[in-house]
Amino acid sequence: MSDITRMASIAALLGDPARANILTALMDGRALTAKELAFAAHVSPQTTSGHLARLTDADLLTVEKQGRHRYFRLASPLVGQMLEGVMAVAGPEPGRTTAWRGGDALRTARTCYDHLAGRLGVALADSLTAAGHVALSPDGGEVTDRGHAFLCDFGAVPLAGKRIFCRPCLDWSERRPHIAGRLGAALASRCLELAWIARQRDSRAVSITAAGAHGFAERFGIHIDG
Amino acid sequence: MSDITRMASIAALLGDPARANILTALMDGRALTAKELAFAAHVSPQTTSGHLARLTDADLLTVEKQGRHRYFRLASPLVGQMLEGVMAVAGPEPGRTTAWRGGDALRTARTCYDHLAGRLGVALADSLTAAGHVALSPDGGEVTDRGHAFLCDFGAVPLAGKRIFCRPCLDWSERRPHIAGRLGAALASRCLELAWIARQRDSRAVSITAAGAHGFAERFGIHIDG
DNA sequence: GCAATGGTTCGGCCACGGCCGAACTGTCCC
DNA sequence: GGGACAGTTCGGCCGTGGCCGAACCATTGC
């Protein structure tokens, strides 16, 4: 199969509205179940199953089995970039000025469910592990004694609950882990509380405030440009 | 029509092998006729006509009438970037290391028919106009007396012939004009003769040699990185 | 064990769209 | 004028593929 034939078959996969819905629903790096994707695609679960099979066959998606669920996510940053490339061409509808500029902002910092992702999320995870406050392993994470004190001092106290305390979540745009679970949620809500970050309308992107730029640098040694 | 529906319809246009052939044939910025594109797409002229109509309707291509020919070219750099994005995902075939890295090289310097395009081609045009050697206008170009002397000294003497002497050619990746016509061809062949540039296998990209880097800087004040 | 739920496979329906042959328009050139 | 050539439009054929209903696994929980 030639280069352009393969290119055409990949593009054909994006060319169906249902599959396009599925892929864009996954663009923020979350992993969603087949049923959630069926809802996003506005088609029945059977039909969705077929689409998902084709997308995973083409290596656009990866799948993880977990109990009776199957979680799908974008297979690589390249896939997200490809989608953005198509968006960039399709986006500027005549008579509409909002070009698709979410790309950069999304990569800089965004929420993933209720925790932080993007460059900021990954940098935060790096900082905490480098300082020996948190130890991440593929299937979970631990907070050290020093880490516990540090986080209490910072004001990020996870709520009690049976939800997993800390786990690494693979970041779509950075392709490296950030911190999810109750700890991730606590960090995000504390940053919001301190007004270090601010939500943006109609987007999962978050912006880093001036106070945040200063705070992240001082407390975590993190410098995010843009 | 929603964002993702439009995205899907754009992607669907790329998803047909014939259209994918057409678009990739135009990726180096040349303008080709419907018949040439029919040949590239391996389908009949009638079928090609339909494809071209859809591609221009979607603003992926622009068309210029010229006599009984219609010349098609990519409508914007975004289209080329989109194609590269899809190539990047489709390209790395398992068991094959040649990823699609032509993109950068093509943008740096390439041939367009028999003259130079890309950053180098545009820089050359800029240099010659800035120095007052050449005056480009939308439908042609003139060489000044000083320019004539300069070009003779450089060794770029256009062949006689009825082909147009000098005309601007819109550069796909830079979206600014470079020099085509007999003059453009003479410049390119002289650069090749001096071994300032070298052709690459199976590609329209050309590489700038060490002598070229030096020569372009000294004679034309051009510095191309990469 | 059984029911409930997530997910897949199968079969059949149907529409969209790619393809070409044939006929038509428009331009160039002798 | 007439012939050659570029390109388009029309009509009809046909395959691909999207969609859902129904039935079928697999896992969880009672």
Image (tube, coloured by chain):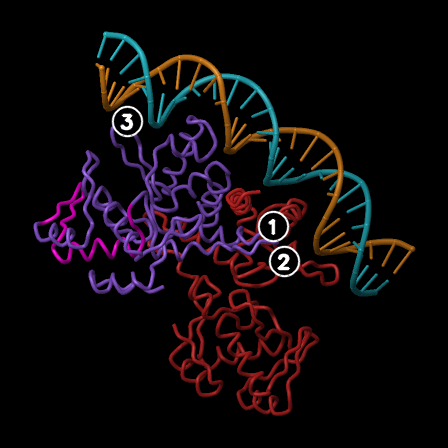
Chain colours: A purple, B red, C cyan, D orange
Q: Quadrant of residue B184?
A: bottom right
What residue sits right under mark 2 in the picture?
A: B62
* Host chain of mark 3: A
Residue A8 drawn at (x, y percent) = 49, 45
* Alpha-carbon span between mark 2 and mark 1: 10 Å
- At numbered mark 3, what does the secondary structure look like: helix, strand or loop? loop
What residue sits right under mark 3 in the picture?
A: A68
**Which one is nearer the viewer's eye here, A43 or D9?**
A43
Q: Quadrant of residue A57?
A: top left
- Residues at discs 1 and 3 both on one chain: no
**Which one is nearer the viewer's eye here, B202 or A63?**
A63
Identity of the amino acid at label 2? Answer: Thr
- At numbered mark 1, what does the secondary structure look like: helix, strand or loop? loop
Q: Which residues are magenta?
A: A115-144
Residue B5 drawn at (x, y percent) = 53, 42
Relative to B168, say whether A146 is above or below.
above
What residue sits right under mark 1 in the picture?
A: B58
